[in-house]
Image (cartoon, coloured by chain):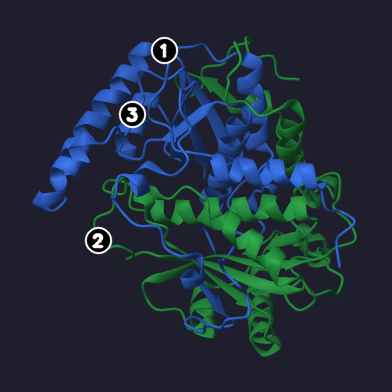
Chain colours: A green, B blue
């Protein structure tokens, strides 16, 4: 049985290609990203599902170098603290990783979530109050996949204190920064995630992550290669 | 300037088509979803970005009708409570909406986040502890887009108490349910979100959601149609 709504073989391959070849990019080369591309990426983000059609997102397109230098300073402070949290034997490896491209990417983009949009009661958010945050993450992933199709690199910088982002970007109290992204051209989309190839952590086989009907129940009927 | 890493025009269109035509599906028709399709969807999910390559997700494929009846009961209880939270004049509209396809979809899928995977310190999660939850949401969105390309409908049911999901599915304490999804064949992928066409909430123009460099700063250089 196949679905009459299925895309063509070529279209499906393209969707799976974007999913498979998307990477977290930290190395950028200079180059202005044209407004029409930025606009396509933002429109892709805004097509994300949102709980109760709440559309809680905003998009801060950040090209100003002073703002970016402030964010970079905040990253350096947060990263210095982060490094001390790892066991001594991992600290050198950690320090050698390039974890952001705040100053060298074409632009930065902060995607936020307005927790009060359309009032206090939102359909579908009545007993899972964080659904608005999750909706905003769906917007991030839409944008990330669209960017891969455009040949544009995206890197998510999470080594930033939320209060620093709030202060530097002037966010109102009800607005939470979800993703701080570096967006730009890059020389390489690596075949595999850098934290895998560098030996930081291993890939978990898919079969080990699938259960049936209840937590912990495995079976063999889905053949996972 | 174009990127040498950009997909072909046809491939880009396919990616944007999946993003644009994805819908939250609540009306299903019977039909077993073949294991090879389920496997492609789960593999797409597992290709999501994860903070520090933590891969915090698990996938519970739920076909058992007893489990689904228990989940459906939990939905009914949560939904009854939800309905009373809306202003009286919206309650009839709310009650008329079909919000889930737990019993009539081909299968249910619960995507969870193991908050303790690979130990307490995770690269990139040192000052934003919820990054593991967000990584798991990226996996949900990957799966949702892949499903659209396969012509398979996905609906996210968030009117469920997390403690009910924990209990019915037997989740360990460190494992958080992120998305409870109904997955199956459907007659219609509507052109627009149902909560928009039904008049529940209006679409927000993209231009109103974009700021430049700091919160609240608008300008006209990105032409948003």
Given the image, what chain letter belongs to the residue carrying mark 1? Answer: B
Q: Residue at x 85, y 75 (%)?
A: A30
Q: CA distance from mark 1 to mark 3?
A: 16 Å
User: In what element is the residue under mark 1?
Assistant: loop
Q: Residue at x 75, y 52 (%)?
A: A148
Q: Which residue is mark 3?
A: B167
- The image quadrant that residue A109 belongs to is bottom right
Q: CA distance from mark 3 to mark 2?
A: 28 Å
- The quadrant in which the N terminus of chain B is found is bottom right
Q: Residue at x 67, y 30 (%)?
A: B43
Give the residue at the far front of this rendering. B225
Instruction: Establish if B194 lies above or below B30.
Output: below
Q: Earlier in the sequence, mark 1 or mark 3?
A: 1
Q: Which residue is mark 2?
A: A120
User: In what element is the residue under mark 3?
Assistant: helix
Q: Which residue is mark 1?
A: B64
| Cβ–Cβ under 8 Å for marks 2 and 1 | no
């Amino acid at each position: 049985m196949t679905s009459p709504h299925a895309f063509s073989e070529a279209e499906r391959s393209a969707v799976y290609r974007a999913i498979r070849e998307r990477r977290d990019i930290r190395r950028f080369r200079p180059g202005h990203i044209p407004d029409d591309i930025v606009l396509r990426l933002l429109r892709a983000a805004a097509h994300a599902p949102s709980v109760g059609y709440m559309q809680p997102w905003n998009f801060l397109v950040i090209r100003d170098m002073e703002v970016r230098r402030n964010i970079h300073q905040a990253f350096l402070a947060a990263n210095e603290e982060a490094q001390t949290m790892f066991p001594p034997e991992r600290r050198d490896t950690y320090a050698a990783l390039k974890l952001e491209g705040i100053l060298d990417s074409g632009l930065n983009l902060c995607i936020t979530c307005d927790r009060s949009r359309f009032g206090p009661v939102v359909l579908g958010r009545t007993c899972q109050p964080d659904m608005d945050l999750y909706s905003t993450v769906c917007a991030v992933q839409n944008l990330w996949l669209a960017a891969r199709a455009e040949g544009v690199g995206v890197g998510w910088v999470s080594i930033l204190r939320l209060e620093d982002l709030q202060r530097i970007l002037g966010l109102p109290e009800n607005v939470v920064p979800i993703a701080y992204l570096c967006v730009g051209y890059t020389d390489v989309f690596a075949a595999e995630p850098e934290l895998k190839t560098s030996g930081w952590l291993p890939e978990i086989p898919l079969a080990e992550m699938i259960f049936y009907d209840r937590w912990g129940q495995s079976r063999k009927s889905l053949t996972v290669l």
